[in-house]
Amino acid sequence: MKVFDKQIYSSLLVKGNLHEAINYLDGFPEQAELVEKYKEVFQNHQLMTRSTNKVIDAVDKIYQAYYIDVFWHKENPQKAELKLFENLWNYCGGNTEIAKDSFIELEVEKIIRNEGFEFLGGDTAGFYGPYIWATSVDETYEVELPYGVQQYALTMMDGFISRSWLDFLSFGKVGTGGWSGKDGTLCCIKSLYDTESTHFKISFLKHEAQHTLDKKLYPHITSTELEYRAKLVELIYWEDEKIITMIFHDAETSDVRNTHAVASHRIISDLSKRLFNVAYVNDLGMFLTKLDDIRNAAQALLDEWN
């Protein structure tokens, strides 16, 4: 009997493969309720009400319609983006020729902030979708990375309405846990972490601190390179199989905009060459027998990149 594997399901969503994820769920009777929820929202276009604030709800539903266009109907991404920004511009009261995407989201941000919420626009792994939340608290953390220790400013955010497209595709079960802000601040989604956990200390603090450091050291570094280096740092510090398993399942190159998936594929490829002397190992079990070697190899790959 097949056993449902949450990591396989999550990885399909990370790659934006919504239909494949639902098909996977459909193979397990215990997931029938979740499959029906997907049909209700995506097939029947029943948008979710995720805020009691009418303004926030209206903006959120404009983005939800975009997610359905892109991930369910497989609409051309550029066409879907144009429709998204036309709808946002109309909601903002625009009555002139449609402006640049970044300008439209600045207008949306003003509206959101006027309601007492915070807003971050732009794209995540190639697809648009905002982060909308209620409160922020500033803290400071000392973080050890492979090449030194230093303090980082951290903003702990809470009361989220939207965490971009992956949050919506997974009904809140999968999604960004935080990010490195333009000013170098580490921005963390409070509800997702126990601050005493290994997950927080490595997969959030070290991962995002490495982003902040790399942006300073390499001003022209690409998003894929940022993810590649931060994932290597996670591999260096994690002592069990969790991160290599996640990276293995997330690896994908079909959409170059999905920087997390592309970076994961590059890591699996580089580890395959270094540990097994082949171009690419498709057997997770082979990696799980070499956890110590993977940590050493990740350090070597990071050293070589420098």
Image (tube, helix red, strand yellow):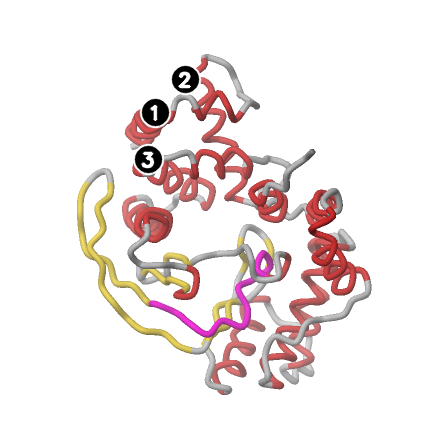
Quadrant in which residue 297 is drawn: top left
Residue at point 35%, 40% (across, down): 234
> Percent x, y for residue 37?
73, 62
Q: Secondary structure at mark 3?
A: loop
Residue at point 37%, 49% (across, down): 199
Q: Are marks 1 and 2 in contact (CB under 8 Å)?
A: yes
Q: Are marks 3 and 1 in contact (CB under 8 Å)?
A: no
Residue stretch in magenta: 156-167
Density class for disc 2 (Cα within 10 Å; few <14, some 14-19, many ≥20) is: some
Horizontally, is 211 left or right of 166 in the view?
left
Residue at point 25%, 63% (across, down): 153
Density class for disc 1 (Cα within 10 Å; few <14, some 14-19, many ≥20) is: some
Q: Measure how far apart labels 1 and 2 are at the Cα level.
A: 8 Å
Q: Measure how far apart labels 3 and 2 are at the Cα level.
A: 18 Å
Residue at point 21%, 39% (across, down): 147
Residue 219 visible in the current orientation = no
Is 163 magenta? The answer is: yes
Horizontally, is 97 left or right of 236 in the view?
right
> Percent x, y for residue 212?
31, 52
In the rendered structure, find residue 297 and report the number of the disc placed on it: 1
Residue type (three-letter) at the residue carrying disc 2 = Leu
N-terminal of the two: label 3 or label 1? 3
The residue singled out by tag 2 in the image is 275
The residue singled out by tag 3 in the image is 239
Q: Secondary structure at mark 2?
A: helix
Density class for disc 3 (Cα within 10 Å; few <14, some 14-19, many ≥20) is: few
> Percent x, y for residue 71?
71, 54
Q: Quadrant of the N terminus?
A: top right
Residue situated in front as seen by the camera: 235 or 95: 235
N-terminal of the two: label 1 or label 2? 2
Q: Nearer the viewer, mark 3 or mark 2?
A: 3
